Amino acid sequence: MREHFTDDLYWLQFDLLAAEPTITHGVFSRQGGVSQPPFLGLNAGSGVGDDQDAVTENRRRIVAALPGHPTLVTVHPVHSNQVIEILPEAVQEGPALTRLIPGRADAMITRARGIGLFWAYADCAPILLVDREHDAIALVHAGWRGTSQAVVAAAMSAMTTHYGTRPNALIVGLGPTIGACCYEVDGPVSQAFAAHPFALEHAAFSTITVTDESDTRKQSLRLDVLESNYRQLRALDIPSNQIERCDLCTGCHTDLFFSFRKEHRQTGRHAVVIALR
């Protein structure tokens, strides 16, 4: 991945996506920004308890750093496999830094230029998809629930329906996600995957031995969210050389990213944006 330093912001771009002249995108760290603890840094998430003026200023800095300065457009994520198409009208109502579109979904698709598909993350997998044949993009928010419902497959299906997208024309970036090293899960999580055969077939579960607070050794069920989504993408016939992974674990790198799990729920959210220009 490519590293960028814009004033006090540290952010990343996927090499595959950065090579596309019609695409602007960014995976922003928590470094920089004006939020105070426990949201310290570049918190881009509303509704987490941070001062809204700080969030607005952080988002302003994010847009200013991105080539093309897209309008940020988002919907409320609900840990589902629902997909919403963002139409040009989303940015035709006058100037605004961020537009919240009515609806609830965990994948956004568009062919509209100047629209920065945007979510703020803290452990879930950001998945950025680019259809180079049809100038179409998608942004996916994949936590364990969305992964168990194959939300990335739903996004690809929607792109095929709306734009004629073919798997071998896609390039994909998998952003920083909590890793199996930090992500212990329980029976309901594995049961959720069991309800969706495609997701279960490609789920990356493992079991390790850990020592708990009472110094007792026990078995711990782990889920690798990023690997699970990578396997789903490969099963959907996207070539491996067209998928780029950021294997930084958000739980291990709380100096760079926010982690809902490791920071005991009270924390910020780091921004991921992709736009056509």
Image (tube, grey):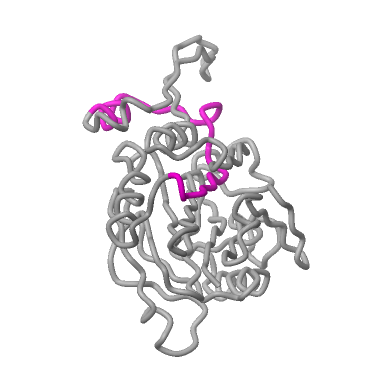
Most extreme residue toward the left, as rendered? 195
Q: Residue at x 35, y 74 (%)?
A: 87
Most extreme residue toward the top, as rendered? 217
Most extreme residue toward the bottom, as rendered? 94
Residue range in magenta is 168-194
Closest to the observer, 11 or 235: 235
Side of 237 relative to 80 (left or right): right
Task: Residue 145: give x, y in percent of width and height.
Answer: 33, 41
Side of 201 relative to 41 (left or right): left
Q: Residue at x 58, y 70 (%)?
A: 59
Q: Residue at x 38, y 27 (%)?
A: 203
Report the number of discs. Answer: 0
Asked if the magenta segment contains residue 173, the reply would be yes
Q: Residue at x 57, y 64 (%)?
A: 23
Closest to the observer, 147 or 212: 147
Quarter of the picture containing the C terminus is bottom right
Above-or-below relation of 40 to 204: below
Above-or-below relation of 147 to 159: above
The image quarter in which residue 192 lies = top left
Above-or-below relation of 55 to 31: below
Task: Residue 86: give x, y in percent of width and height.
Answer: 36, 69
Task: Residue 46: give x, y in percent of width and height.
Answer: 47, 65
Asked if the magenta segment contains residue 274, the reply would be no
Side of 61 relative to 181 (left or right): right
Closest to the observer, 143 or 55: 143
